Image (spheres, grey):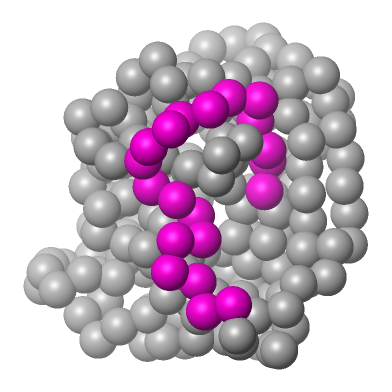
Amino acid sequence: MTGTVFFSVSMSLDGFIAPESLGELMGQQWLELQQWIIPQRFFRERLEIGTGGEEGRDNDLVRETFERTGASVMGKRMFDAGEHAWPDEAPFRTPVFVVTHEERDPWSRPGGTTFHFVNDGVVSALDRAREAAGDLDVRIAGGGATILQHLNAGLVDEFTIALSPVLFGTGVRLFEGVDASRVALEQVRAESSQRVTHLTYAVHAR
């Protein structure tokens, strides 16, 4: 088990990664935040939202993110939002460990995704994800609270922010409540396209 633990998210210029209400998750503001990824060929194929699409560096980065991931961890809020929105062949195609208080049997979907429901916290979920991922990486898929728990606990090695040219004004902030006394960052890559800027950081203990 030698993989990297990482997260990758789209973020508005004022620091938000999602609207506060799940009911607004597919609203206009959310679509503006994700405007860089929706046209990408790999993303469209993975989520079964249409044929064709753009190919280029943005598309390559989406593909690399999925292909490096051997397992994912997510919070219950993200799972609840996606359970009825994802296609039958859910886009992860790996084991996914959902941090929740709900007791539920594993839920297997066509294409290789199985959701496992973990009731004893993020450390346990991450341990199980590491074991399932083998030599591949573990992605902390979201949402914001789950990412923050892993970051504050020193469990994240690296992250990428796709900085989108949109302002939210309110919503779920990525770094709201971060323990800045424990987290130090090193920028390792910055790439821009017409739609977005990709910023990648290594995470170190301060």
For residue 177: magenta? yes
- Out of 154 and 125, give the one closest to the viewer: 154
Q: Which residue lies furthest to the left in this view?
A: 103
- Out of 149 and 16, give the one closest to the viewer: 16
Q: In this view, does 122 lie to the left or right of 119?
A: right
Residue under the point 67% across and 10% down? 52
Asked whether residue 136 appears in the rendered view, the answer is no
- Out of 107 and 81, give the one closest to the viewer: 81
Q: Is residue 84 above or below residue 52?
A: below
Q: In this view, does 51 lie above or below 48?
A: above
Q: Is residue 196 left or right of residue 174?
A: right
Q: In this view, does 87 lie above or below 127?
A: above
Asked whether residue 5 appears in the rendered view, the answer is yes
Residue under the point 84% across and 26% down? 193
Q: Where is residue 140 in the image (x, y as percent from the top left)?
A: 51, 64
Residue under the point 59% across and 69% down? 138
Please report the bounds of the magenta region as a residue range.
161-180
